[in-house]
Image (cartoon, grey):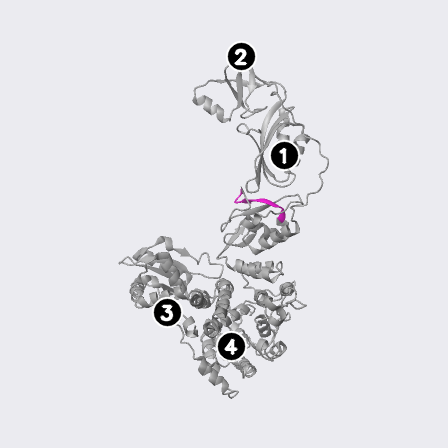
Amino acid sequence: MSAEATNPSAPGRRRGRPRIDLRRIGRAALLGPTARDRLPDAIGHVADAHRAHHPDADLTVLRRAYELAESSHRGQFRKSGEPYITHPLAVTLILAELGAETTTLTASLLHDTVEDTDVTLDQVREEFGDEVAYLVDGVTKLEKVDYGAAAEPETFRKMLVATGNDVRVMSIKLADRLHNMRTLGVMRPEKQARIAKVTRDVLIPLAERLGVQALKTELEDLVFAILHPVEYERTRALIARYADAGDALATVADDVRTVLRDAGITAEVLVRPRHFVSVHRVSRKRGDLRGTDFGRLLVLVGEDADCYAVLGELHTCFTPVISEFKDFIAAPKFNLYQSLHTAVAAPDGAVAEVLIRTHRMHKVAEAGVVALGNPYAPASAPSASASPSAPSAPPSSAVASTASTASCAPAAAGTAPATAPTAPTAPPTGDPAGGPDPAENGERADPTRPGWLSRLLDWQQSAPDPDTFWTSLRADLAQDGEITVFLPDGGTLALPEGATCVDAAYEQYGTAAHACVGARVNGRLATLGTVLRDGDTVQPLLAEDEGSGPSPDWLEHARTPTARIAIDHWLAAHPHGPDTPDADPRPAAAVVSGRRPTANAVVDAPHTGVRLAGCCTPVPPDAVTGFAVRGGAVTVHRAECPAVRRMETLGRQPVTVRWSGEAPCRVTLVAESFGRPRLLADLTEAIATAGAAVVSATVEPPSEQRVRHTYTLLLADAAGLPALMRAMRDVPGVYDVSRAAQHPPSTR
């Protein structure tokens, strides 16, 4: 498959800046250096793209970086036959068009020098400063000869840890992979498929999370062409068949411009054709497509308030499709994305999707973290002007967390080196230019680091095995969204969509969550498998018993690598379940049987037999009432017993009943609890200590870690019932004890 065949840039697709002729750039590079007072022709396009975003940028450092890259790569060629220097030039051009600042472009020009040439990292540091050296080291691959099959996962681990300290590392990697995917056609088909799968499973989700939609969409199309060639060709034919579909959207766009102009709203209305994968998804969702399904309208305005003004005009002058409305300005996506989404129906019934955002939002939506520039630049200085032409130290130091990456364990025995790979060495602390002070613990943490990346950096330390890390990484990146849940103390937890109470427990407590027995979600008791929603308040409940631990069932509810890895480790260390200590001698709970105790309830009619109802087991000082039954006796019920309402409905006349003196009484209690070892023993001990005797007991089978115990007990005095119920509630794992409303199930 040729490079052109794998590149979905074809008629009908949105075009931006014209594609640069890399072969011509390669020939310009081979002509050698130019005069020192002007830029080499080969990087003229890079300079133009960079100055378009940063007019005051100092290009001297780019010239020096290019000269070092060109001289070090001289004589090297890509598999396509082009001079190798065309690759770092293309990567740098991609980043320049996205608006990357000078430091990132300098590092991208040099990103392969340490890996593929005799240039050393110390040379880069001496010539361009610590920050450029850090970025170059972050994207440098680990040697396969040293790490064997573990080289790829450990390289990604190293890059991700470096990204945790500076997201520009991953920006360079994404641009590098995009150019490699554009030219993948010269590779063998099996290698194309392998690289495309890694791109699909790891790099595309990373581009999505970092908000770099411009790179993500093209990578999706390139992967689509390689892994699904039949569907790709079908989609290409579909787009070609509707090559004039833009006319349908253009008509709606003209109507929108007229409406906004009449309303006095200054806005730019553009037609954005969908990329190949988007068209494929829409066709699967909607079936037959209409002309307006091949693109969307983009409305760009100056201020946030203008976005809502545009929305109001559209919903007033067109028929809105309310189900398509989403407000990502008030509630931005976890990847920085902000926009208003809506859809309106044209007079002919065609539905046009509309995106409304400011120019600033649009830049961030397209370039993501690349548009944020240097996260360490002082707020008063433009990031592009912070040129690395002199070896200046960045604001703070890297890293305790980077050093912890030394947990990047080698591969299996026989394929791994004696020492684990180390993350890029962070630059020294201190910023002579007046940047922010380093963190107190000496860690350089990127202030733009998103929550999902912090979680990833945490759990990767618990996955020293490369296979475990690689599998967990792909599973983690497969999560599509992120939610925020609140803790009772006002704190928050960021979790992936679909996370459960198990994930929240391990996110909050780490390995201490092994003792989790349940949770409260929005104040209500919930099982560990309860799926959390954005904005929920969650309180994991931990047992006091140190011997308790997770069960294999927990893995069915765990969604985060943090939880899954911790549970797997515990289960591997405890193959036979929790280590329960020998039981201490406990007083035996008395178990009695036989007839019910004599009732101390009396009625006004003399010589009338009185018995206490078994459905509600009334005891003093319960409010009670009675009903005459066959044989002349009176059965006494609690006033709130459901049987009382049934009797009254049937027209039965109640009999006045009162308590008289003290007498033994029988009561049925229901204990709701979370399952754990020794729970039954602890409950019966609490009952015996309170001086009650067990008449009967029923334990229902556990359901989702919850167990119900029903006890019929004989008390010497009803006055001791409140103390007995408190004692049962104090047993670890018991969350509620109540009087039974009906007769307990049979124990036979």
Q: Which residue is mark 2?
A: 605
Residue 352 x, y percent position in the rendering: 33, 60
Check disc 4 and report the residue beneath it.
Answer: 88
Q: Earlier in the sequence, mark 2 or mark 1?
A: 2
Which is closer to the viewer, label 1 or label 4? 4
Q: Quadrant of residue 274?
A: bottom left
| Residue plotted at (41% across, 72% down) | 5
Q: Quadrant of residue 679?
A: top right
Give percent across and percent down for residue 635. Answer: 53, 19
For disc 4, the neighbor class at 10 Å (few under 14, some 14 to 19, many from 20) is many
Tell which residue pokes out farthest to the top in this image: 607
The residue pinned by badge 1 equals 728
Residue 369 drawn at (x, y percent): 50, 66
State yes or no: residue 518 in magenta.
yes
| Front position among marks 2 and 1 | 1
> Would you place residue 559 above or below residue 738 in this image?
below
- Between tags 2 and 3, which lies in front? 3
Marks 3/4 in contact by CB < 8 Å: the verdict is no
Identified by mark 4, the residue type is Pro
The mark nearer the N terminus, 3 or 4, is 3
Distance between the alpha carbons at the discs numbered 1 and 4? 71 Å
Q: Which residue is mark 3?
A: 13
Q: Is 164 or 589 nearer to us in this picture? A: 589
Tell me which segment is drawn in magenta.
514-524
Question: Marks 3/1: CA distance?
Answer: 70 Å
**Contact check, label 3 and label 1, Cβ < 8 Å:** no
